[in-house]
């Protein structure tokens, strides 16, 4: 495949771009019935071919601007052997400019975690491990199709927080096997550990997943919107009582400096290069994405063919709507000054005028030139943006 140049531009006029790097590892020991990421069941032989193909894709890229974050997501990056991870990390460092103090993160499933593996990830340069705890209720873990149980999640958490890595835990709430009290109790348990960061996702049922079929057959009953709002508020209240900062709809950090630097790039429209099947990239104006199937991805690279499936050129209107949507999901909110510099003063004034009624109804706060969501606004951030951008 021919060499390609990644030419990132910054969301902020006059400032240098600060790109991030994402690598998608599609393998999972078992595919969970709620998941719609590009994943497949692990296959030891294909995993090895995948690592070689990924290295090939990485080598096709050139970039003059150094990446500030490296995020191995999936799928299950922790399924890669030590040797495979070394090869991926080495080819990334040899092929692409990465700042010396870049934040390297890796997603791990609890069953892959032990003190030796944590130590080896640290030696490879990873600074953050994102642990897929999901729940501390055995019944819920079983219903979610997870292989681990509460005791394993807790021991993985304990090993991770005593390692030199910073630890984030992913939790899913809203499965009917769990009561609100039980969820909050589990959340308190995770907060009791020395963890630095937690992501709490409300269970989403995606088209084409086994959970969708269960919902359609009436075998899985999801909470109503008003019940979900109660869970959302109660979750935020637990964090607030512990002095944790919610900084995005689903993300909480014990201290501001432990917020996810990598995800922040997505929310602030910083450019990112995505590698691996289904990975999306964004250079500030164009977005493109790789083919989703791992076998297709591997075959194309072996044949020297293109792995990008499609490209989209974003108009000013697209960028504006996305920027409003993404920034109103964060407590830092939307700077109207930034909006004016990026999209023109007239547009910024229009957004400000349209925001007035949401400020009056308590969904948004206007502090100086920054519009930010209240807790109630955070719960419905996605529906505010189209109205403001209209
Ligand atoms: C890319 S997944 C990979 C993480 C890792 N493989 C795991 O599952 O433990 C990142 C996170 O997305 C969340 N997630 C995935 N599907 C979800 C869904 N349908 N609803 C809510 N959260 C979901 C889970 O919390 C998961 O840890
Ligand atoms: S939730 Fe995680 S482990 Fe489950 S299928 Fe998705 S990526 Fe794999």
Image (cartoon, grey):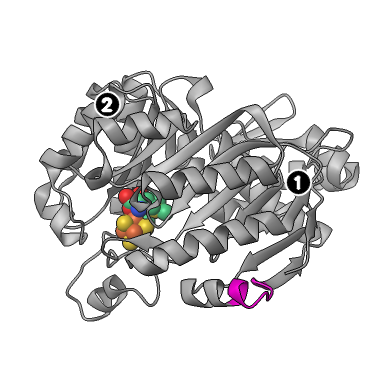
Residue located at (38% from left, 62% from top): 27
Q: Quadrant of ligand 2?
A: bottom left
Mark with earlier residue (1, 2) = 2
Residue 1 among magenta residues: no
Q: Dot 1 corresponds to which residue? A: 351
The circle drawn on residue 191 is 2
Residue 290 coordinates in the image, percent (x, y): 61, 68
| Element assignment for label 1 | helix
Residue 2 coordinates in the image, percent (x, y): 77, 67
Front position in the image: 281 or 352: 281
Residue 87 coordinates in the image, percent (x, y): 51, 47
Front position in the image: 204 or 143: 143
The circle drawn on residue 99 is none
Residue located at (61% from left, 45% from top): 92
Front position in the image: 29 or 83: 83
Instruction: Name above or below for residue 59 compared with residue 111.
Output: below
Q: How many labels does the image show?
A: 2
Left or right of 85 on screen, residue 344 = right
Q: In which quarter of the image is residue 196?
A: top left
Q: Is residue 225 visible?
A: no
| Element assignment for label 2 | helix
Left or right of 300 on screen, residue 218 = left
Residue located at (63% from left, 61% from top): 57
- Quadrant in which the N terminus is drawn: bottom right
Residue 131 coordinates in the image, percent (x, y): 33, 40
Mark 1 Cβ and ligand 1 under 8 Å apart = no
Q: Magenta region: which residues?
A: 300-309
Residue located at (50% from left, 31% from top): 125
Front position in the image: 46 or 291: 46
Residue 306 among magenta residues: yes
């Amino acid at each position: 495949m021919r060499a390609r140049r990644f030419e990132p531009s910054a969301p902020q006029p006059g400032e240098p771009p600060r790109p991030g790097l994402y690598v998608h590892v599609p393998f999972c020991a078992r595919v969970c019935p709620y998941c719609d990421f590009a994943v497949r069941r692990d296959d030891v032989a294909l995993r090895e071919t995948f690592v070689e193909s990924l290295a090939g894709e990485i080598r096709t890229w050139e970039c003059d601007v150094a990446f500030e974050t490296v995020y191995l997501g999936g799928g299950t990056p922790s399924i890669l052997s030590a040797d495979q991870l070394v090869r991926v990390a080495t080819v990334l460092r040899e092929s692409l400019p990465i700042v010396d103090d870049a934040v390297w993160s890796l997603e791990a499933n609890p069953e892959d975690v032990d003190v030796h593996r944590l130590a080896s990830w640290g030696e490879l340069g990873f600074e953050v491990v994102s642990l897929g705890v999901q729940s501390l209720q055995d019944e819920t873990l079983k219903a979610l199709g997870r292989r681990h149980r509460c005791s394993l999640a807790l021991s993985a958490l304990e090993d991770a927080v005593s390692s030199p890595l910073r630890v984030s835990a992913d939790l899913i709430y809203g499965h009917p096997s769990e009561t609100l009290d039980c969820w909050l109790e589990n959340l308190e348990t995770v907060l009791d550990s020395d963890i630095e960061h937690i992501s709490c996702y409300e269970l989403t049922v995606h088209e084409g997943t086994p959970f969708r079929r269960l919902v359609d057959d009436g075998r899985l009953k999801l909470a109503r919107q008003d019940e979900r709002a109660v869970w959302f508020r109660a979750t935020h209240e637990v964090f607030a009582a512990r002095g944790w900062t919610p900084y995005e709809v689903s993300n909480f950090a014990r201290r501001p400096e432990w917020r996810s630097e990598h995800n922040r790039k997505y929310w602030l429209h910083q450019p990112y290069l995505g590698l691996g099947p289904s990975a999306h990239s964004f250079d500030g104006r164009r977005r493109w994405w790789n083919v989703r199937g791992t076998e297709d991805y591997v075959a194309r690279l072996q044949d020297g063919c293109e792995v990008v499936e499609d490209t989209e050129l974003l108009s000013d209107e697209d960028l504006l709507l996305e920027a409003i949507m993404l920034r109103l999901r964060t407590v830092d909110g939307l700077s109207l000054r930034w909006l004016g510099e990026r999209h023109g003063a007239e547009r910024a004034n229009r957004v400000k005028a349209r925001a007035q009624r949401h400020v009056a109804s308590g969904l948004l706060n206007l502090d100086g030139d920054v519009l930010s969501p209240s807790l109630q606004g955070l719960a419905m951030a996605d529906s505010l943006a189209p109205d403001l951008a209209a």
